């Protein structure tokens, strides 16, 4: 007798700012993933801290999740404090040494400030200190890693948005607003 296995699910959610990447809030009063009416039995593949926003992958495919986390790129737009010179980004490109670990090299470039929806609360604006934007692509994702990296080069992160997961790119082949989600085919995420 053949037993049919159920199809695996792959969901991309645009996680809003100030929402935890988990389904229960525990003792905290923060909003969490339970408010988005996601299908049962899917779990976050990685996470975004509550201060970050953007694409969050959820799936019921544990083998895929492990493989994806360790070998597929994630892309971020990062708004930073202060005027950035290209040469200041070289430590990130080469593998920045932080006090507790050394980061893998990543792709990092300055970009024009992205035109996206306003965040609530909005970014603080200071008259004498400009805001600049970076695009960072990396395959690792330690807790608050990008924030630690930009702070280490003297440009603290003001806003962090994940805009790419594998082959999926926000505003290119996936258009979501904060709190919206879409089921996708595995082939949209990776080349098997």
Image: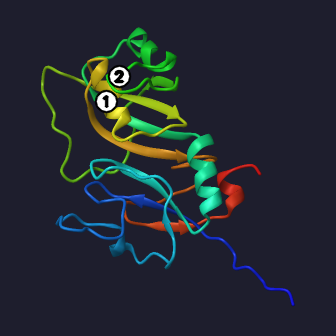
Q: Earlier in the sequence, mark 1 or mark 2?
A: 2
Residue at 13% over, 20% down: 128
Q: Residue furthest bottom?
A: 1
Between residue 45 and residue 100, name the one nearer to us: 100
Q: Residue 114: x and y, percent?
A: 39, 38
In the depicted structure, whether residue 38 falls above or below residue 119: below
User: Is there any visible trace of residue 44 in the rendered image?
Assistant: yes
Viewport quadrant of the N terminus: bottom right
In the depicted structure, whether residue 14 falls above or below residue 142: below
In the depicted structure, whether residue 188 falls above or below residue 89: below
Residue at 50% over, 39% down: 75
- SS under mark 1: helix
Residue at 64% over, 57% down: 64
Q: Is residue 3 left or right of residue 94?
A: right
Q: Which residue is mark 2?
A: 98
Quadrant of the rendered structure where residue 162 is? top left
Q: Residue furthest top?
A: 87
Q: Is residue 102 left or right of residue 98?
A: right
Q: Residue furthest right?
A: 1
Quadrant of the rendered structure where residue 86 is? top left
Camera-near label (1 vs 2) is 2
**Dot 1 and dot 2 residues touching (CB under 8 Å):** yes
Please tell me how crowded label 2 is: few (under 14), some (14-19), or many (20+) other residues with Cα within 10 Å. few
Q: Which residue is mark 1?
A: 148
Please tell me how crowded label 1 is: few (under 14), some (14-19), or many (20+) other residues with Cα within 10 Å. some
């Amino acid at each position: 007798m053949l037993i049919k296995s159920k199809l695996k699910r792959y969901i991309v959610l645009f996680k809003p700012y100030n929402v935890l990447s988990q389904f229960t809030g525990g003792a905290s009063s923060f909003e969490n993933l339970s408010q988005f009416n996601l299908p049962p039995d899917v779990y976050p593949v990685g996470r975004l801290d509550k201060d970050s926003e953007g694409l969050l992958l959820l799936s019921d495919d544990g083998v895929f999740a492990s493989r994806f986390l360790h070998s597929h790129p994630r892309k971020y737009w990062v708004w930073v404090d202060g005027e950035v010179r290209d040469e200041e980004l070289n430590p990130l490109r080469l593998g920045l040494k932080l006090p507790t670990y050394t980061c893998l090299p990543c792709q990092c470039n300055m970009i024009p400030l992205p035109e996206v929806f306003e965040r609530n609360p909005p970014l603080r604006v200071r008259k004498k200190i400009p805001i600049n934007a970076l695009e960072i692509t990396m395959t690792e994702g330690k807790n608050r890693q990008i924030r630690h990296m930009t702070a280490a080069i003297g440009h603290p992160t003001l806003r962090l948005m994940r805009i790419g997961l594998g082959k999926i790119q926000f505003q290119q082949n996936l258009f979501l607003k904060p709190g919206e989600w879409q089921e996708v085919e595995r082939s949209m995420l990776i080349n098997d």
